[in-house]
């Protein structure tokens, strides 16, 4: 049974979501604002977070800034904001999906299950499937990434993006290709999605993100994972 942390300042919304999720086989824990959510997350260790943006004391964006320093638990943002810039800010902070209010409960459950499936589907695999390209190693079962001897913490979406590229080193992927493969993600219609993911990914795996050696840009097309680590490309 997966645990869902519901963060919303409206108790009626909390109860509505919690009751529906409980009926669908989830365990739920609640928080009224970002500050309380940090405390609850540290003690309950939820499998996924449903996060409202507009809240008193600490809003959802500030929660994300602090939470991502501690954990890479998947987060679905719940908000009435629909501007593309708001979606991009959430994405940059490490959100994995975005559901706009008002939403249907069946849709919300489908989104939760899609994200959980992406993140945890390899947990019970009999053996690890490891991808290695140069000094980067990616374990699809444990979702652990290392660069040399250094372990790198990636968000679920960053991990999925890296997996796609490392599975076919040297192959050029257009932004459309990569967006299509990030299934179950409502950021799919945001043009800057892939670029934001790539920027965040480079900041974590590249020795010098300004001169990347691993994730290379193919100008006018998209991106590829470097199979020969030829310097001078970006």
Image (cartoon, helix red, strand yellow):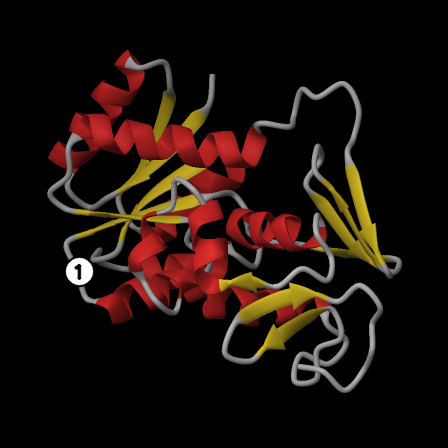
Q: Nearer the viewer, residue 138 or 45?
A: 138
Image vertical order of residue 215 relative to residue 39, above or below: below
Q: Is residue 83 visible?
A: yes
Q: Using the image as rendered, state which of residue 154 and residue 188 is in the foreground.
A: 188
Instruction: Name the quadrant of the C terminus.
Output: bottom right
List x then y, in percent, for residue 166.
71, 53
Q: Measured along the vertical axis of the image, is residue 66 above or below residue 47?
A: below
Label 1 Cα neighbours within 10 Å, binned few <14 / some 14-19 / many ≥20: few
Q: For the point 59% across and 68% down, which residue is it? A: 223
Q: Count the numbered circles shown.
A: 1
Q: Describe residue 40's horizontal placement relative to residue 136 as left or right.
A: left
Residue under the point 61% across and 54% down: 154
Q: Position of residue 10 (x, y in %)?
A: 15, 42
Q: Secondary structure at mark 1?
A: loop
**Residue named by callout 1:** 82
Give the residue drawn at x 33%, y 35%.
Answer: 111
Q: Is residue 193 left or right of residue 151?
A: left
Left/right placement of residue 60 relative to residue 73 reads: left
Give the answer, above or below, for where 48 lies relative to 85. Answer: above
182, above or below 142, in the image: below
| Residue visible at 36% across and 13% down in the picture | 25
Q: Where in the figure is residue 69, as x and y percent of width and height? A: 56, 59
Q: Within the image, what quadrant is residue 134 found in?
A: bottom right
For residue 140, which quarter of the picture?
Answer: top right
Nearer the observer, 81 or 134:
134
Instruction: Find residue 19 and report its horizontal and vertical position in percent.
Output: 22, 19
Q: From where the camera sits, is residue 65 visible?
A: no
């Amino acid at each position: 049974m997966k645990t869902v942390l519901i963060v919303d300042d409206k108790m009626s919304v909390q109860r509505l979501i919690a009751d529906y999720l409980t009926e669908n086989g989830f365990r739920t824990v609640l928080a009224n604002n970002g500050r309380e959510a940090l405390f609850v997350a540290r003690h309950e260790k939820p499998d996924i977070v449903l996060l409202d943006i507009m809240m008193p004391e600490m809003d959802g964006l500030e929660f994300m800034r602090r939470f991502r320093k501690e954990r890479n638990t998947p987060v679905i943002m719940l908000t009435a904001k629909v501007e593309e810039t708001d979606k991009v800010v959430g994405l940059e902070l490490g959100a994995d999906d975005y559901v706009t209010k008002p939403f249907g409960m069946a849709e919300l459950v489908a989104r939760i299950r899609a994200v959980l499936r992406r993140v945890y589907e390899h947990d019970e695999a009999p053996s690890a499937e490891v991808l290695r390209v140069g000094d980067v190693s990616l374990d699809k079962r444990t979702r652990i990434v290392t660069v040399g001897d250094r372990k790198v913490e990636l968000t679920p979406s960053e991990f999925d993006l890296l997996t796609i590229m490392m599975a076919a080193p040297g192959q050029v992927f257009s932004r459309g290709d990569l967006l299509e493969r990030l299934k179950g993600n409502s950021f799919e219609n945001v043009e800057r999605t892939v670029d934001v993911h790539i920027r965040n990914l480079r900041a974590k795996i590249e020795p010098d993100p300004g001169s990347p050696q691993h994730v290379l840009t193919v100008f006018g097309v998209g991106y590829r994972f470097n199979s020969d680590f030829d310097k001078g490309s970006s």
